[in-house]
């Protein structure tokens, strides 16, 4: 269990189906990435009283062709068993010139829901960005 899962265990357990969803997506990512010696873990989570949940995953995979490790931040919204996600590659497995560490999102500052739109404010070590999602 990651530190984020431990920190947010009560919140995760309070939302029906959320624990199973997080376990499935991190397991699925590990299953896919294990061929490439990779992993995926929960970085941050915010659950609103309405049951809408925002999460940040961090996934890594080693390049089979050599060169290094690819890293992607995954920001998602969960509601009533449905999800939508946006992915941000911040480290290229082969060419460091393509790295964009500003997109290494690891923290959720806030989540604002208006009608069927969710705005998730995420932060990396050097950037804060507002991402917009159509609620699932």
Image: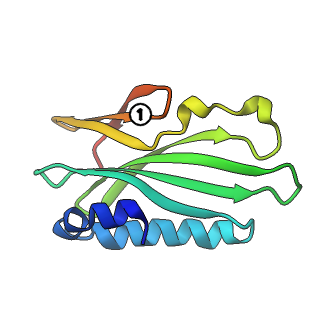
Residue at image location 50% in from the left, 27% down from the top: 126
Image quarter in which the N terminus is found: bottom left
The x and y percentages for residue 55 are 36, 51
Describe residue 89's horizontal placement relative to residue 45 as left or right. Answer: right
Q: Measured along the vertical axis of the image, is residue 76 above or below residue 90?
A: below
Q: Find the residue positioned furthest to the right.
A: 65
Is residue 101 placed above or below 66 in the rendered structure? above
Q: Residues within 10 Å of mark 1 (few under 14, many from 20)?
A: some
Left or right of residue 70: residue 16: left
Where is residue 51 shown, x and y percent of the image? 16, 55
**Residue 72 shown left or right of residue 110 in the figure:** right
**Residue 39 to residue 66: above or below:** below
Q: Count numbered badges in the picture.
A: 1
Q: Is residue 70 above or below residue 11?
A: above
Q: Read off the residue under disc 1.
A: 123
In this view, which residue lies farthest toward the left? 49
Q: Quadrant of residue 38?
A: bottom right
Picture quadrant where residue 109 is located: top left
Spot occupied by residue 80 in the image (x, y as percentages of width and height): 22, 61
Q: Give the x, y percent position of residue 16.
A: 20, 69
Q: Residue at x 58, y 55 (%)?
A: 59
Residue drawn at the location 78% of the way across and 29% of the way down: 97
Toward which corner of the image does residue 110 lie, by quadrant? top left
């Amino acid at each position: 269990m990651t530190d984020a899962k431990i920190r947010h265990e009560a919140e995760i357990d309070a939302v029906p189906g959320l624990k199973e969803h997080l376990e499935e997506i991190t397991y699925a990512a590990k299953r896919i990435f294990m061929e490439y010696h990779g992993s995926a873990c929960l970085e941050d989570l915010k659950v609103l009283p309405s049951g809408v949940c925002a999460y940040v995953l961090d996934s890594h995979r080693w390049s089979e062709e050599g060169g290094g490790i690819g890293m992607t931040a995954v920001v998602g919204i969960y509601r009533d068993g449905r999800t939508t996600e946006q992915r941000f590659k911040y480290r290229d497995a082969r060419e460091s010139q393509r790295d964009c560490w500003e997109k290494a999102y690891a923290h959720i500052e806030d989540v604002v829901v208006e009608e069927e739109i969710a705005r998730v404010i995420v932060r990396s070590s050097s950037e804060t960005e507002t991402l917009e999602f159509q609620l699932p």
